[in-house]
Image (tube, rainbow, N blue to C red):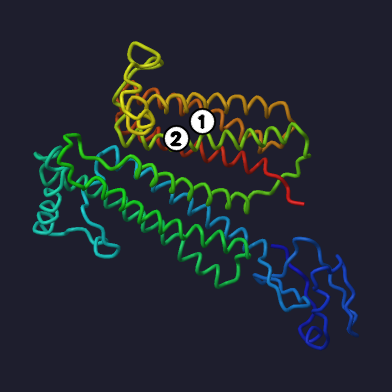
Amino acid sequence: MQRLLLPPLKALMGGPCLRLLGPRAAPRTQCGCSCGIRIPLRPGQYSTISEVALQSGRGTVSLPSKAAERVVGRWLLVCSGTVAGAVILGGVTRLTESGLSMVDWHLIKEMKPPTSQEEWEAEFQKYQQFPEFKILNHDMTLAEFKFIWYMEYSHRMWGRLVGLAYILPAAYFWRKGWLSHNMKGRVLALCGLVCFQGLLGWYMVKSGLEEKPDSHDIPRVSQYRLAAHLGSALVLYCASLWTSLSLLLPQHKLPETRQLLRLRRFAHGTTGLVFLTALSGAFVAGLDAGLVYNSFPKMGESWIPEDLFTFSPILRNVFENPTMVQFDHRILGITSVTAITALYFLSRRIPLPRRTKMAAATLLALAYTQVGLGISTLLMYVPTPLAATHQSGSLALLSVALWLMNELRRVPK
């Protein structure tokens, strides 16, 4: 932070010198009192304190300093990282079928894991009363139960860490006055979304614990609730990352040409497509649709399988038919990588800053890496390490797409 050379304290207290710090102060302003002090003021220049007080006709207005904005930006960047960790850990929990091992939810009580043999046996007995044990894991040992229990426990504890990472610093920055009026609204929305995400997670788990007498299928959580849980996490991640990048990265003053406007719109649409593709992965995971057709590029012996529309009404197939869900995910993935390729070559036709070109090239490389991971996961019958890497790749791809969008954002007038 640059330092503003302030006059001696006695001089400031001896006259109305602070009036020169008005909202329309000139770059170098002559004081109106008898002290004759001239204070240089340039845009973006602040004192060594965290805020600069401006005297207006209606009272004192406080503006956050550039240093405070950088601190808030770094905080939100860390928060987005914790959300990314929660998404990745949640994916591994789903792949290892560990999500239904904890059959109740307590905000404070469940933070302490079982420590004695009696406590573990009591926890195991509670799990044995629910459909997953009765239908799928009826021969599970206590040692095997401990593994899936700790997987779900680590995911829930990480979720609590995410909540603390948002709420505690937000309260501190709010009290220090480091948040602008608009930023306060964003921070409140982010903290509210964190709390909603936790409740939605338990609502999702409950769907897998319900008894279904007429069903002999493997107990699993509702794919709709799983998609809602993942979708809200992705929204939280995108909002946090976008805000942090906006605060930390210097904005390019690009000429508003027709080509740039077209590129910006295409980047927005491509990012939305990447988001939708990642969200469709929740339906693939929820229905175990990755185990239906393990061939590529065809699905079995045909390009369009015969059991694509077996459910009635037809709309149910989009969300409940594993064949259709895998087919849709394939189409979305191919469309995404095609759009990213077109976006890259379109960006090459426009003179862009070096950092923006780097974002476009990184997005292209990640897109083809993600396609390779997806095909490999499918052909190898969804091994957990490879499937987890593929899920993490979708988050990385979405992150770089947001970075490119941020590079191309319009300069406010």
Per the image, the residue denoted by label 2 is 393
Q: Secondary structure at mark 1?
A: helix
Rendered image quadrant of residue 267: top right
In space, the residues marked 2 and 1 are separated at their CA atoms by 8 Å
Q: Nearer the viewer, residue 354 or 370?
A: 370
Residue type, label 1:
Leu
Residue type, label 2:
Gly
Specify few, some or many for label 2: CA neighbours under 10 Å numbering under 14, 14-19, or 20 or more: many
Is residue 223 positioned above or below 3 on the image?
above
Position in image of residue 240 (x %, y %) = 52, 52
Residue at (87, 68) in percent of width and height: 28
Is residue 317 positioned above or below 408 on the image?
above
Q: Residue furthest top?
A: 301
Rendered image quadrant of residue 43: bottom right
Direction from residue 258 to residue 360 in the image, left or right = left
Position in image of residue 153 (x %, y %) = 27, 52
The dot on residue 397 is none
Position in image of residue 400 (x %, y %) = 55, 38
Direction from residue 66 to residue 380 in the image, left or right = left
Per the image, the residue denoted by label 1 is 366
Q: Nearer the viewer, residue 26 or 264?
A: 264
Residue at (22, 52) in percent of width and height: 102
Labels 2 and 1: the sequence-earlier one: 1
Q: Are marks 2 and 1 in contact (CB under 8 Å)?
A: yes
Direction from residue 132 to residue 56 in the image, left or right = right
